[in-house]
Amino acid sequence: MSKVVNSIREAVRLAGLKDGMTVSFHHHLRNGDYVLNMVMEEIAALGIRDLCVNASSLFDVHLPLTEHIRNGVVTNLISDYISGGIGRVLSTGILPNPIQFRTHGGRPFDISTGKTPIDVAFIAAPTADPMGNCSGKYGPSACGSLGYAFADAMYAKKVVVITDNLVPYPMQDFSISENYVDYVVTVDAIGNPKGIVSGTTKITRDPVGLVMAANAAKVIQASGLLKDGFSFQTGAGGATLAAAKFLKDIMLKEGIQGSFGLGGITGYMVDMLRSGCFRSLMDVQCFDLKAVESIREDPRHQEISALQYASPGSKSAVVDSLDVVLLGATEIDTDFNVNVHTDSNGYIMGGSGGHSDTSAGAKLSMIIAPMFRARLPIVTDRVSCISTPGRDIDVLVTQGGIAVNPKNGELTQRLKAAGLPIVDIQELKEKTERLTGKPAPVPKGDQVVAQVIGRNGDLLDQIYKPL
């Protein structure tokens, strides 16, 4: 028996896709993904219209999707993150209904509860067998963890696995089981694995960034959380990776072994594992090829689903056991609300991803950001879009000082006792504006182009079409 069919078009027909249904995609090949564009081209050729696309993230490689929106093939869009190129087009209001931004934990939760049901899930699988057992760890397009695809496979009405590396049944060390899969399609290439490296994955050499990173590591050291069993997540930005480097030095010097590193895993986190800083890595997506190699070869480097990573509806989620998370921001306001959805002109250029999930779960959530970018201050009276509520942010580290959320009096005292440069966030804002001037408000239109939905399903904010 085999579930292999001749083409994507045949799989779409067999799955029974009709007008008004929902299709889903995962983003583990990131800016190297070919599958979403291939599938949507076949769907459009079949004359199917009025679809909702539920994609865990969208990158600039997916710009052809905007033509399917203009042509009426796609009328609704759900995603956790949308990169700047495609985001700028979507910000102009071409979609007839607002984008629904979810979080990396909220998306699988809503899929699992039926709030956002999926009719057909298309899973890009770097290796699969004829029955649909599949993995991201092996094959010419290996991307590592398939963590964001698990909920799609488990709860979609129909599941199509698309692979460029079909192996004999049964494949070993599969991630997603055949019992979730209806059809398998082979293609020449599902993507370019080099495209999974999106954004900065190298430690910054910028002196300002290094100052912020060193202070961030000192905050962790002074917080009381850095001890055996410590758990940690960091993003892939240059300053946050530099903070991880300083933290690694402290852990090795003091003989501290953490329990786990979490999240989207970079090669630098792999280095921390191999140096003995952690007993394990828990990986929902690999950010670079070194992480892909590690998850394939090292049993301490574990693949987890987005449900296990951050779903608020799971019986337990790893983010709720997290000690410290290091994050970035495009804006933060004096109430510690953070924006990672829009740029300084109000155009979509990102999304929460796991930002608000980890901030809600971690004991210490820290933003590392410069006082200003391109002479625009990072701290404002009110962010243009709330991605993560201020109640979940503990510390802002800049080159001009460290601001602690007033809710954390004990932490403030610990950091002052350690001699760290603590500053009130309002004072930091005023200090920055003396250097940059106070920017004029960004004008907004009346059309809502996106809704920002929090981890628990609450509407955090709305994004309006820029003028």
Image (cartoon, rainbow, N blue to C red):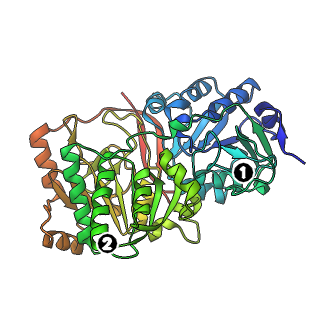
Q: Quadrant of residue 150?
A: bottom right
Q: Amino acid at mark 1?
A: Ala
Could you say whether the residue bearing mark 1 is in a helix, strand or loop? loop
Choose the circle earlier in sequence order: 1 or 2.
1
Asked whether residue 405 is in view, the answer is: no
Pointer 1 local density, CA inside 10 Å: few below 14, some 14–19, many at least 20: many
> Image height check: is 287 above or below 41?
below
Q: Quadrant of residue 408?
A: bottom left
Q: Position of residue 83 (x, y in %)?
A: 45, 36
Give the side of residue 427 with respect to residue 441, left or right: left
Q: Amino acid at mark 2?
A: Leu
> Image height check: is 7 above or below 426?
above
Residue lying farthest to the right in this orientation: 1
Q: Are marks 1 and 2 in contact (CB under 8 Å)?
A: no
Residue lying farthest to the left in this orientation: 434
Q: Position of residue 69 (x, y in %)?
A: 59, 28
- Residue 39's label in the rendered image is none
In front: 3, or 317?
Answer: 3
Pointer 2 local density, CA inside 10 Å: few below 14, some 14–19, many at least 20: many
Could you say whether the residue bearing mark 2 is in a helix, strand or loop? loop
Q: Quadrant of residue 261?
A: bottom left
Which of discs 1 and 2 lies nearer the camera? The answer is 2
Q: Residue at x 69, y 45 (%)?
A: 127
CA gap, disc 1 and disc 2: 41 Å
Residue at mark 2: 226
Q: Position of residue 313 (x, y in %)?
A: 58, 66
Q: Quadrant of the C terminus?
A: top left
Asked whether residue 73 is in view, the answer is: yes
Residue at mark 1: 156
